[in-house]
Image (spheres, helix red, strand yellow):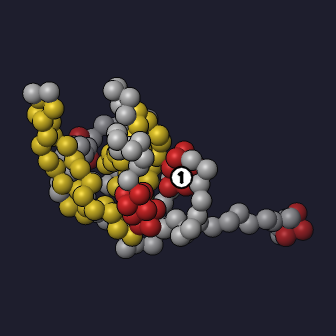
Amino acid sequence: MFTIDYSQAQEFATITDGTYEVVVKSAKPDASKGGTDFMNIQFKIRDDFDQKFKNNLIFHKIWVNKETQQYNANQINTLAKTAQLPDGAKYAGVEEFLNALVGKHLKVTVRNEKSEYNGNTYENLNVKKLEKSAIMAPAQSAPIDITEDGLPF
């Protein structure tokens, strides 16, 4: 049994401009309705220490240049460096690179901005800066093997 207590409810407010420690929740190749490819990256604001907007998501897209049909090397390398992927690492394709990002910790600076498209105005939370995380990732411990002989009973 559980009891509903509105005093403990949280309202999901718009993430304010600022810098947040995040973890890459998901990263997948995607395409717009018009067919332009992009990297669709979801950052989750970390909840393993005290900061505003814990567990909220920040959506980030890296678009293919329509003229060159290539991703911007500066954006890719900055993301890889701030996520602390190994320098010189080689990936067979975009999907393998994006899979390597999942679970990585970094710091993002975001800003709420308005944009216009086809006569409509939109509110967007845009990633403005990527940096290495200033907070250590939670320790990941390896499983401990215990044999029957190691048990006291």
Looking at the image, which residue sits at the far right? 149
Neighbours of disc 1 within 10 Å: few (<14), some (14-19), many (20+): some
Would residue 92 be found to the left or right of residue 56 on screen? Answer: right
| Amino acid type for the residue under numbered disc 1 | Phe
Count of numbered marks: 1
Q: Quadrant of residue 30?
A: top left
Q: Residue at x 41, y 66 (%)?
A: 82
On the image, the x and y values in percent for residue 38 come to: 39, 41
Q: Is residue 72 visible?
A: yes
Q: Is residue 52 left or right of residue 62?
A: left
Residue 100: x percent and y percent?
55, 55
| Residue 6 image position (x, y, % from top left) | 23, 40
Q: Name the residue that disc number 1 marks.
A: 97
- Determine the residue positioned at 53% across, 70% down: 87
Which quadrant is the C terminus positioned in?
bottom right
Answer yes or no: is residue 47 visible. no
Q: Relative to 152, is 33 above or below?
A: above
Q: Where residue 69 appears, x then y in whole percent?
A: 41, 42
Residue at 14 percent of width and 27 percent of height: 118
For this rendering, which residue is in front, 1 or 87? 87
In the rendered view, tell whether residue 147 sits above or below residue 41.
below
Placement of 59 over or under 88, stated as above or below? above
Question: In the rendered view, does 25 fall on the left or right side of 121?
Answer: right
Give whichever of 77, 15 is nearer the camera. 77
**Which residue is at a point 18% across and 54% down the rendered structure image?**
111
Element carrying mark 1: helix
Q: Quadrant of residue 89?
A: bottom right
The quarter of the picture where the N terminus appears is: top left
